[in-house]
Amino acid sequence: MKFDDFASGVLTQEMAKAAAPPTELWENKRGGLVIIECPKPIPCDPCHTSCPTGAVLPFEDINDLPKVDYAKCTGCAMCVAKCPGLACFVVDLTYGGEDEALIKLPYEMIPCPEEGTEVECLNRVGEPAATGMIVKVQEPQRDKTLVVHVAVPKSLVLDIRAIRVKSHG
């Protein structure tokens, strides 16, 4: 099966890079910046309506693709929990030194990972890409989607988009 075109539903590497924040802002932003990988116009705007700082800009039309004012983004991850398409992520490149970063990912599976748990980090097609460590599990109010904060290799922040809790059996 070929996963390198969007007909598959999987973003290409070029599309993923285009969704990333500007490097000069991203490298020094404590708390991280949102990445919204929403490639097709659909009637949806929870990323905007949930953003407490207005970083996800208002939509002129409900079908617009999200636009971000990165100067306003605090990395709070409210949009991560609210996005029904699981297309929002926050990446903090200032976390953990030279080789490690923090990704805040949506999580809707059982079991819920606990802080300090080692997990498999998966790429866009569900293949293992690295091992990561759960740093925090954020439970946003009025929502069932958890946001897991995972320490990952910095070189893979544009590739990792999910985790799998390792079984203990």
Image (cartoon, grey):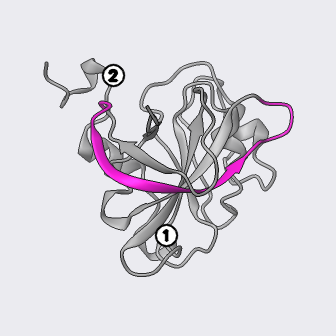
The amino acid marked with disc number 2 is Gly
Q: Nearer the viewer, residue 165 or 44?
A: 165
Marks 2/1 in contact by CB < 8 Å: the verdict is no
Q: How many marks?
A: 2
Secondary structure under badge 2? loop
Q: Is residue 158 visible?
A: no
Q: Is residue 6 visible?
A: yes
Q: Is residue 9 magenta?
A: no
Q: Is residue 150 above or below residue 12?
A: below
Q: Would you name the residue on which mark 2 appears? A: 9
Give the residue furthest to the left: 1
* Label 1 Cα neighbours within 10 Å, binned few <14 / some 14-19 / many ≥20: some
User: Relative to 89, is 48 on the left or the right?
Assistant: right
Q: Nearer the viewer, residue 104 or 22?
A: 104
Start-end of magenta stretch: 125-143
Secondary structure under badge 1? helix
Taking the spot 62% from the left edge, 74% from the top edge, the residue there is 30
Taking the spot 49% from the left edge, 24% from the top edge, the residue there is 41
Q: Would you name the residue on which mark 1 appears? A: 26
Give the CA separation, mark 2 to mark 1. 26 Å
The mark nearer the N terminus, 2 or 1, is 2
Q: Quadrant of the N terminus?
A: top left
